[in-house]
Amino acid sequence: MNEEYSIEVYRYLEKEFNQLDLHRPMRIERYEIGTELAYDISTVGSAQIAKVHLVIKKFVGGGFAGQVYQVEITDIESETGPIDSLDVGGVYAMKILIPPSSFSLLFRNVLYWVGFQGPFQLQVNPAAARSGALWQKFIRRGAKIPFGTESAVVDIHATFVDNTLGSCGELSEWVEGRTWRLEVDDHLDVLKHWIKGKKTDPQKLGSPEYRAKLKFMRQFVELLHQIGAHEFARQYEWSTWKSQPNCLMRSGTEDSPSKGLTAVDFRAGLALLPFLPMSPGDFKLIVTGLMRGSLVQFDRGDTKKLKHFIKAHKNQFTGTDKMLEELESAEQTYRNSVPDITHNHIRLLYSPTLWSTMLKSAITGWRVKNLINRRCQDQLQNNTVLTLLFLLLGLIPLIGRFFRRIWGQPFWRTHYRMILTHTGYLRRAIRAKFIEKLISWHRAGRVDDDKALTIAKQIWRCSYHWPMSILPAGIHKILTDWPYAKERLDYYLLRPVRLYFNNDLREQWLRDMVTEGQQKHLLNNEDAGVILSQLDEPYIQKYLKSLAVHVCTLPVTQVVSVIVAIAYVLANPDMPRTQAYAIGLGIIALFQVVPISPGSLVRGLYVLYLVIKERNFKDYNIAVFLGFFKYIGYLAFPIQ
């Protein structure tokens, strides 16, 4: 996602779309700063119903689980009085459970379908979103037992449905904070002993924030298992190497490395399949899941274990009886909304309740995604045959989507009828489709501001951008934007040469790297000062020059691999083109995985040249061997 694109350009393109006066709404992937929204919400805990009006203040980011915003509430309409925890003018976190990226959405949904044989429930099933929110409320209550405060878990306030994006969502407490700072530690061996629980010297033990977060997350995972939230614990397992950002340190608590640590993310993005671990920690999670009888894992909790935990800590859970009843009801609906062969087993063969719930939840999901209107929803709920037919239509590629649209929404029927009967409307519809594509390209950094405005005025230019859009964003832009291509080619091909011949440029390069290291806390001020004070030393100058040579060799393997692939295709004109292109791609791929490549050979021979020229093996005894190997060879001189 390109963070530097212009919101003004987006607003211009949005205006262009609206002026086309189509009968269908504009396709929205995510919201922009300043967008005003209104939702019918249900609060978590008190179950109050209200309508909130809010404005987007910031787009925080998006992953597989959904997209996160900072929002400000501008108005609350409620017939039952003030809403718990929500105030006009208050700033909150809003998470809508659909990724802004099409690829992330597809990948997430495919994994979920393989695991549970149904659509991603947190997105399309309000009962699933409600269940997760209620579990979070109970976890927050329980957090006071080991940590002394409920604020160790972010508070969640309400759930809602966004029919524009086609997803459920939630409003939560906004936590102003940060992840841990990178810390310089000269005694990593001591830290390693501490992690293993061995006795260590407190004077040599560093990395206080690292140790505090590790301890917090281990305690939190233990609490989650005690409370019955076994699969929620996956979000905080240290060994997954991706859970650490789910824990933030609140601003204003930085006087202590352990004070203010807060668990902020309880919505998993990807199902954990037993044959597809995606991190080192997943191997352990798969085994422990199998021991609990859970072959596929996502966010399943054990309400019986939760009840036992509540009974053992009554004082901490006073006034939660109705919330527990709602959780049990939501859990039952949620778990019965998909076939889930690994958990439902033979119930699929005899349970009418299971099948009835699946069909009702499917209808609800279609309504959430705005595939059907209220009238069609009522029609399907009263006719099982029509529901099954609508379900089957969704399994037919391309044409099935068309028939579902004209069945479920009147505006799609009008839109397609106008396309078939009015040439002018057809032209406007095509232009609108390209504008939507253009917005996506602009956000992704495939086209800059000026290019986006030019294409919007000359929409025919999309005809050559569209085929390029299947390529990575950088390659797409290089192939369609000559000034950008010159800049990138200069950076990758000519800058390394300038670094080799220009001493001042090399020194500035090192200064920039040192400054970046200080900003990221990879270097303390003392170490940075030592490095900069040694800039004029001959060995450092030699190191910088050799590093420039290494940078020069970065594109060598890619260039050679492409040349060899093209040469092979041209040398075999009689071979079927599909087969020739496939072999050409295979040649390029092979160059990427072999341990010694053209680029690494150039690096290794350069180091060997220095050894012979200077008759000095001692200063190159590591680099002369590592330089010949791919990938690790890039680090030959830094390691030396």
Image: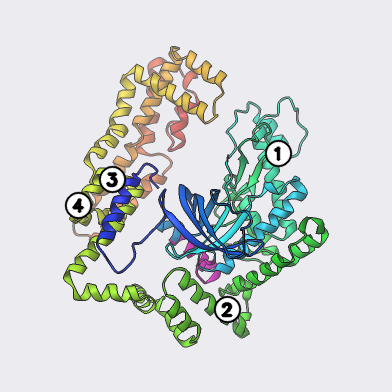
Residue at the (19%, 65%) spot, across then down: 427
Residues 508 and 196: in front is 508
Q: How many marks?
A: 4
**Cα gap from disc 2 to disc 1, whole angstroms:** 47 Å
> Which mark sits nearer the N-terminus, 3 or 2?
2
Q: Measuring from the top left, give residue 7's x and y in whole percent.
A: 35, 46
Q: Nearer the viewer, mark 2 or mark 1?
A: 2
> Which mark sits nearer the N-terminus, 2 or 1?
1
Point out which mark residue 195 bears: 1
Q: Are marks 4 and 3 in contact (CB under 8 Å)?
A: no
> Which mark sits nearer the N-terminus, 2 or 4?
2
Amino acid found under the numbered disc labelled 2: Thr
Region in magenta: 106-121
Q: Are marks 4 and 1 in contact (CB under 8 Å)?
A: no
Q: Which residue is mark 4?
A: 457
Q: Is residue 236 left or right of residue 593?
A: right
